[in-house]
Image (tube, rainbow, N blue to C red):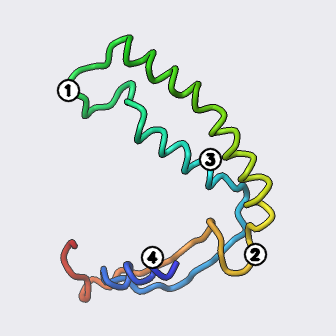
């Protein structure tokens, strides 16, 4: 939250309100594993690909995703067993809301 507040202020915003809520569902590890898989496993389709993927690439992605199911299941179990009991304790939370006002006169150019 401190980093977000600092960045908003550097961009010329004034933070008016900040709320922290207890997360409704902890999926932090699952999300991290899924994003890591998407970064490593060849995409089955993306606008940036030079040409549409063929059947072999699609089959490779499917096989790799199936092989990753145990890692996804483990991440889900760890989210539920380890992170959920800790969620909302102290000032650490993955759910928050920030209301900020743009001070147009103090706003610098893009960084």
How many callouts does the rendering have? 4
Residue picked out by circle 3: 30
Q: Nearer the viewer, residue 105 or 31?
A: 31
Q: Position of residue 7 (x, y in %)?
A: 37, 79
Q: Position of residue 23 (x, y in %)?
A: 70, 63
Q: Nearer the viewer, mark 2 or mark 4?
A: 2
Mark 2 or 4, nearer chain start: 4
Mark 4 or 1, nearer chain start: 4
Q: Is residue 78 left or right of residue 32?
A: right
Residue 109 against residue 28 in the figure, above or below: below
Residue picked out by circle 2: 89
Mark 3 or 2, nearer chain start: 3
Residue picked out by circle 4: 4
Q: Is residue 11 left or right of residue 78?
A: left
Q: Nearer the viewer, mark 4 or mark 1?
A: 1
Residue picked out by circle 1: 50
Q: What is the spatial separation of the Cα atoms under label 1 and label 3, in whole angstroms? A: 30 Å
User: In what element is the residue under mark 1?
Assistant: loop
Determine contact: label 4, label 1, CB under 8 Å.
Answer: no
Label 1 Cα neighbours within 10 Å, binned few <14 / some 14-19 / many ≥20: few
Q: Is residue 83 left or right of residue 18?
A: right
Q: What is the spatial separation of the Cα atoms under label 4 and label 1, in whole angstroms? A: 36 Å
The picture quadrant where one finds residue 76 is: top right
Residue at position x 62%, y 66% in the image: 94
């Amino acid at each position: 939250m401190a980093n977000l507040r600092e960045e908003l202020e550097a961009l010329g915003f004034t933070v008016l309100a900040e709320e922290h809520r207890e997360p409704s569902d902890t999926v932090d590890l699952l999300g991290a594993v899924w994003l890591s898989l998407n970064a490593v496993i060849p995409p089955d389709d993306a606008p940036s690909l030079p040409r549409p993927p063929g059947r072999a690439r699609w089959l490779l992605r499917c096989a790799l995703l199936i092989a990753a199911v145990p890692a996804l299941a483990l991440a889900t179990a760890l989210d539920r067993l380890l992170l959920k009991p800790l969620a909302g304790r102290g000032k650490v939370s993955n759910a928050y809301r920030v209301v900020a006002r743009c001070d147009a006169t103090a706003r610098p150019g893009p960084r």
